[in-house]
Image (cartoon, helix red, strand yellow):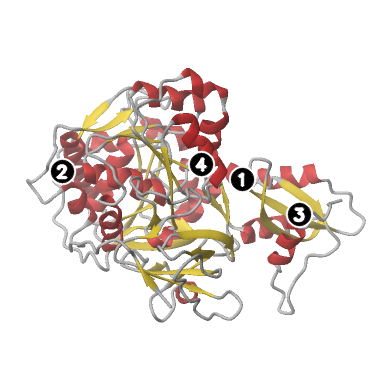
Amino acid sequence: MSFASPFPPVRIPDVSLFEYVFGAPGRLEGAGRTAFIDAATGERVDFQQVHDRVLAAAGALASLGVTPGSVVALHAPNSPEFGVAFHAILRAGAAVTTIPTLATADDVARQLRASNAIALITDPAVTGTALPGATAAGLPDERVLLLGRGDGTDGVGGTGGGHARLSDLAALGHQPPEVDIDPATHVAALPYSSGTTGRPKGVRLSHRNLVANLAQIETNFGIQPDEMIMAVLPFFHIYGMTVLLNLSLRLRTTLVTMPRFELTAFLEAMATHRVTWAFIAPPIAVALAKHPAVDAYDLSDLRVVFSGAAPLDGELGKALEDRLGVTVVQGYGMSELSPVSHFTPSTAKDVPCDSVGFAAPNSENKLLDPATGAEIELPSEGVSERGELCVKGPNVMLGYLDDAAATDAMIDADGFLHTGDVATVDARGVVTIVDRMKELIKYKGYQVAPAELEALLLTHPSIADAAVIGVRNEEGEEVPKAFVVRQSGTELTAHQVVEFVAAHVAPYKKVRRVEFVDIVPKSASGKILRRELRDRERGGTPGR
């Protein structure tokens, strides 16, 4: 039996994401309010400046041949310029595919090719991987643009290493193009996700998907217009993209941006700018709850900590609440859901912080028995049986890019997206994630596909077979663990396995633990039986 959101339905206008965030032409509200504060430089940018820079940059992109239906890649850490570039791509009618800052040159090239990107906008901080990746993907130099001022202060030099600056092109005065798009079908964002298994796939999110998700959360989170919001979670990730960048721009709140998490700088920015809301992932919660450095900073303005991207332990959430005197709430989602499908409002009472709260407005949920596929009955009291969480609503993706089979496997004939996570629901509609069916590993909020690591491990001459699962470390964080079968007669060590993988992948994808086994358990069809490996872990079977 399916269950609907307890929140009243919201209106979803038939407009582009740019118009929903900034308003109809000539109707920019809150123009003088501060949109961004760059914590690293202290630079402040108001909404009028952001709006005008977006239009100028959109004109510059159109002059380079960026048109409706094309794809532009954005590879940069958080900054006000990221926000400008993101919305300039959309205003030009194109889709933006965001690339993680920790991506290797091979990763960059792979995503550029897979997404059919015709241009790349990147930052001097990541040109060491971005530029080789662009070259490998065959992008011409004139289609690779740099953020930054070009005055030599960013470490690249006044010429930008031979590549044009987006800001310089925007200053030439090209007018933004007139574009006519269908919000329901036109792709706005193309993040890459591993879904429930396998290699990363392009997630086709329409303007309507992203507008709908903002409409679903904007009045229910409990954010007020005068909030100061910490923006350390990356904008290139769908969580940061929707819940930080676009939601804050829509609500005219102020974002304090940081390019990466470093505890002392994070605490300093929180105290200096009197941050009231912090969107975080569980590893930051661990630091805030336990690190002694926190006591040296005045965080008394902080009201709410919202955790997402990975499960937050209830005891950790309570410890954070007690230490800082804040409200800790949690949400749930995935790239394929734009991303928010569940959340706890900051004003909600008696909702455990280890739950992910309620289904978003305008959405419908069901739980399916993992063994039989039968729908699980909703409880009139207490908590339901465990079942795979499935979500239907206007925030469900259009589908995967060039992968109809994966799309059909993810979204059923009734329009429900199968999340691959096992949940329960109580009589109030509070949903709690209790287990995982899917193979995807989430390390510090980043997605790690076991199949990708397994394919790499099998290229090592001393490895006969391998399997990878997520396991919990001492801090309760999920990390990739490899089960490795040595080739006969070899003396491969765990350290050598770790070093081999680290040399070929982005840092967040590294194998953190290794266990040598005689055989990798598989089904008759050859599919790795990861659940047997997870059961082995829970049972404490010793490694060798």
Residue under label 4 = 317
- Across and down, in percent, residue 494 comes to 80, 46
Q: Earlier in the sequence, mark 1 or mark 4?
A: 4
Instruction: Mark 3 or mark 1: name the one nearer the start of the chain.
Output: 3
- In the rendered image, which quarter is residue 412 located in? bottom left
Q: Residue at the location (43% across, 24% down)?
A: 155
Of tags 1 and 4, the one toward the viewer is 4
Q: Can you name the residue that lies furthest to the left here?
A: 26
383 versus 345 height, above or below: below
Residue carrying label 1: 477
Evaluate if marks 3 and 4 touch, with contact meaning CB atoms under 8 Å apart. no
Label 3 vs label 1, nearer the camera: 1
Going from N to C along the chain, the mark reached first, 1 or 2, is 2
> SS class of the residue under badge 4?
helix
**Precedes in sequence: disc 2 or disc 3:** 2
For marks 3 and 4, give the one nearer the viewer.
Answer: 4
